[in-house]
Image (cartoon, rainbow, N blue to C red):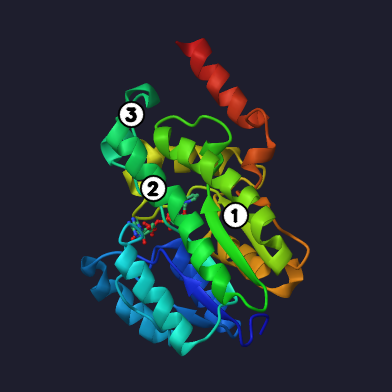
Amino acid sequence: MLLQGKKILITGVANDWSMAWAIAQRAAAAGAQIAMPYAMPALEKRVRPLAESIGAEFVQECNVQNDAQMDDLFNKIEEKWGRLDGVLHAIAFSDKNELMGRYADTTRDNFKNTMDISVYSLVDIARRASKLMTDGGSIVTLTYFGGEKSVPNYNVMGVAKSALDSSVRYLASDLGADGIRVNAISAGPIMTLASSGVGGFKAMLRLNAETTPLRRNMTLDDVSGAALYLFSNLSSGVTGEVHHVDCGYSSTGMMPNDMKDILLKNLDDK
Ligand code: NAD
């Protein structure tokens, strides 16, 4: 019961494939009380039964671009709970027509919208949540390696993840004096509603599974375990960190020999 008595806001549950849902379940099983809003009315029918199954509260619409909905969520949490101990930020969006082809073709409108939803929302949520973290707290976001190196088709979302990683460091510096830690989990690719919008994602999953040091893809258990650690006091000295939960992919500079042999043979056969 690592999170016994902790009050944690989990954003970003869209359905039972969402990484946020795996993390919400794990946190609830470890003793946390969960707040679980959803982004838009169409998601309520999926999210409400999930929330009920773990006794989550504050199951209400909260689009991060809607200030009135954000005010309402945080006011209600303050009134009913009086404080927060943790927040999961698991929110990203971009026009899927621009998650294929060239980054150079990104439009100004989609650039701004992607940054607003996927990056500024962390800043906004951290500022609001920190006021309720009267006894310290832990803020965790989900990022991806495409913010550190270019990844085909990830495009503007990669640039948003770079800004998200940087925001983690600046927020950690701002909020650390109040005992609030801010970290990112850099998750390996996994099939979800959001990732299915990235061009060529299935191929990326197949290739990734063959090339990581662990020779498999990351699982929901892997990512929820890391979140449990970051929300718990086990990680009390950790802040401003981008923690890779990607079966080691980001630690490598070249594909493994067996994959290299297959590629070279194909090239030779051409
Ligand atoms: P998901 O589709 O289940 O979650 C994305 C969430 O963002 C959804 O719940 C959606 O409702 C929410 N969202 C989008 N626009 C919003 C808005 N305006 N207001 C409030 N919420 C909004 O997919 P996921 O893969 O679990 O994504 C969660 C996070 O993990 C994202 O930040 C994503 O970039 C990141 N991530 C995903 C992968 C992957 O391969 N799936 C890898 C690394 C990081």
Q: Is residue 164 left or right of residue 250?
A: left
- Position in image of residue 85 (x %, y %): 60, 76
Residue 104 sits in which quadrant? Answer: top left
Q: How many C-alpha atoms fall within 10 Å of the one at disc 2: few (<14), some, or many (≥20)? A: some
| Quadrant of the rendering where the C terminus is positioned | top left
| Quarter that holds the N terminus | bottom right
**Are the residues tagged 2 and 1 within 8 Å (C-beta)?**
no
Element at label 2: helix
Residue 106's mark? 3
Residue under label 1: 185
The answer as to whether callout 1 falls within 8 Å of ligand 1 is: yes
The Cα atoms of the two marked residues, 2 and 1, are separated by 20 Å
**Residues marked 3 and 1 touching at CB (< 8 Å):** no
- Front-most of 41 and 249? 41
Q: Is residue 36 at least partly visible in the picture?
A: no
Q: Amino acid at mark 3?
A: Thr
The three-letter code of the residue at mark 1 reads: Ile
Q: Is residue 263 visible?
A: yes
The label nearer to you, 3 versus 2, is 2
Q: Earlier in the sequence, mark 2 or mark 1?
A: 2
Q: Quadrant of ligand 1?
A: bottom left
Whole-Å distance between the Cαs marked 3 and 2?
15 Å
Q: Earlier in the sequence, mark 3 or mark 1?
A: 3
Local secondary structure at mark 3:
loop
Q: Looking at the image, is mark 3 or mark 1 nearer the viewer?
A: 3
- Give the mark nearest the N terminus, 3 or 2: 3
